[in-house]
Image (cartoon, grey):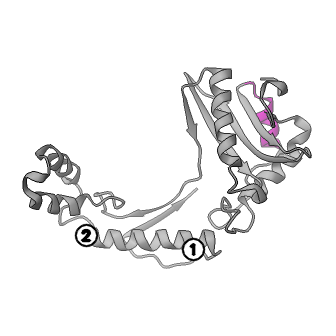
Amino acid sequence: MSEASVAGAYRRARPDEVPALVALVESAYRGEPTASAWTTEAHLIGGQRVDRDMLGAAMADPRTAVLVRVDPTGELVACCELRQLDGAVASFGMFAVSPDRQAAGVGRELLEEAERVVVREWGATRMELSVIDVRIELVDAAHESFTDVCDYQAFLPTLGDAVPALVIDAIDASAAEGCTDADMPIERAKELTNTFAINFLESVFRGGELISDANTTLPDDIIFMSR
């Protein structure tokens, strides 16, 4: 893909732009969280998000394209790394938008351009997204705490013929290994899920501290993991 092959403000990054790209990614992911600059990970994970060596190696790889969006003044305002994988698959990573351009549609437009590039250049039919892994696991919550499967298992049969037997059978099958007396009660799972969901939103939009095993004594029915 030549620079001219990407329409408008989109093109491949140049080797001399590595310092500017590092600054762009770090500003997007290691800055302070605000209502507009919401992509920061500083409250989730420490360390440098990307460095010059990593970017230089990516740009030298023929199976990788670092796509940038440039504003009329020449400033890099968004970027992403596209990688050709085996088969008709591409990966999408290092997605960054300058904090003062976030929540304005720039990221959506860059993603759309990335999709066009991997189809045109590599014939990709699927694109995978890479993200950091920070999660809370609920011990013995085999009913998948983000669903109400246990509640539905008890409630739907009370509606009589209004619910097809096939639906009830499917829910029963999903709940068979997760709604027993040995598993975490569904109300406890909801309580924990709500607590951590609200805490996450507080950390992003108000700059609060994210609950972790480093700052909070967690109960025995929770496992905190991040990488």
Q: Give the position of the N terminus as an image quadrant.
A: top right
Amino acid under label 2?
Pro
On residue 8, the disc is none
Identify the secondary structure beneath mark 1. Answer: helix
Picture coordinates of residue 206, whole percent (x, y) = 63, 75
Secondary structure under tag 2 reads loop
Q: What is the chief secondary structure element of the magenta stretch? A: helix
Asked which quadrant contains residue 144, the reply is: bottom left
Q: Nearer the viewer, mark 1 or mark 2?
A: 1
- Tell me if I can see residue 212 in this picture: no
Give coordinates of residue 177: x percent, y percent. Answer: 21, 54
Residue 18: x and y, percent?
A: 86, 43
Q: Give the residue pinned by disc 2.
A: 185
Give amino acid for label 1: Glu
In the rendered structure, does residue 207 fall within the stretch colored magenta? Answer: no
Whether residue 204 is visible here, answered yes or no, is yes
In this rendering, position of residue 30 left or right of residue 169: right
Crowding at dot 2, Cα within 10 Å, few <14 / some 14-19 / many 20+, comes out as some
Residue assigned mark 1: 202
For the point 59% across and 49% down, the residue is 131
Q: Earlier in the sequence, mark 1 or mark 2?
A: 2
Going by the picture, which residue comes out furthest to the left?
Answer: 160
Image position, residue 223 (x, y; %): 44, 65
Q: Is residue 79 above or below residue 4?
A: below
Magenta range: 53-62
**From what the image shows, is residue 133 above or below residue 18?**
below
* Quadrant hosting residue 150: bottom left
